[in-house]
Amino acid sequence: MSTEVVSHTIMNPIDHQDYSYVTLDHLRVIEILNFSNMKTGMDFVKLILTKSPKLRKVAIYLNKQVVDVHGKVKILEEMIQYPRASAKAEIVILN
C-alpha cells in the first residue's frame, strides 16, 4: 500500500451519515483484498453490511504483513457485532 493511499484514507474516515441515501441492492458477494484493521477499512465493511440487503458473503483476505492471529481475532470479534441489512450475510476472513 502506498503512503499516498494510507494518508488519504486516514484523512477521510467514512461517516455513515454521509451515506444515508446509499443502498447497495446489487451486491451479493464482495471480496476485499489486502485488508488491515485500520478504522477506515472496518468502517467500509460496516457500511457494506448495513447497506446491502441481498448480500450473501463478504470474503476478506488479510494483509499478512500487517495483521497477525490476534489482529484477525479482534477484527472478527468486531465485525460479527456489526448490524446487517441481510440476515444471510456471512463474513469469511482468510489469510
Image: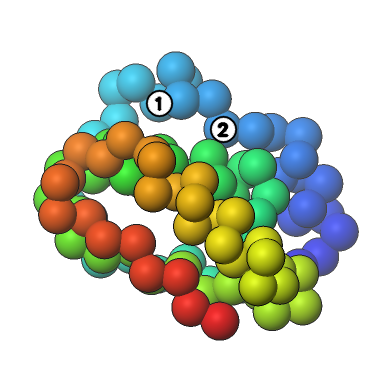
Q: In which quadrant of the rendered view does residue 40 lie?
A: top right
Task: Give residue 36's mark.
Answer: none
56 in relation to 47, above or below: below
Q: Amino acid at mark 1?
A: Tyr
Q: In which quadrant of the rendered view does residue 34 lie?
A: bottom right
Location of mark 2 (residue): 14
At horizontal 77% and vertical 78% (from top left) the residue drawn is 65
67 in relation to 82, above or below: below
Does residue 25 show up? no
Depth check: give the residue in front, 23 or 66: 66
Location of mark 1 (residue): 19
94 in relation to 71, above or below: below
Depth check: give the residue in front, 26 or 65: 65
At horizontal 32% and vertical 44% (from top left) the residue drawn is 49
Q: Residue 10: x percent and y percent?
A: 76, 40
Q: Residue 33: x percent and y percent?
A: 53, 72
Q: Is residue 34 left or right of residue 16?
A: right
Q: Amino acid at mark 2?
A: Ile
Does residue 74 show up? yes
Q: Quadrant of the C terminus?
A: bottom right
Q: Is residue 40 left or right of residue 6?
A: left
Q: Quadrant of the N terminus?
A: bottom right
Rounded to the nearest angstrom, the CA distance separating label 1 from label 2 is 9 Å
At horizontal 65% and vertical 42% (from top left) the residue drawn is 39
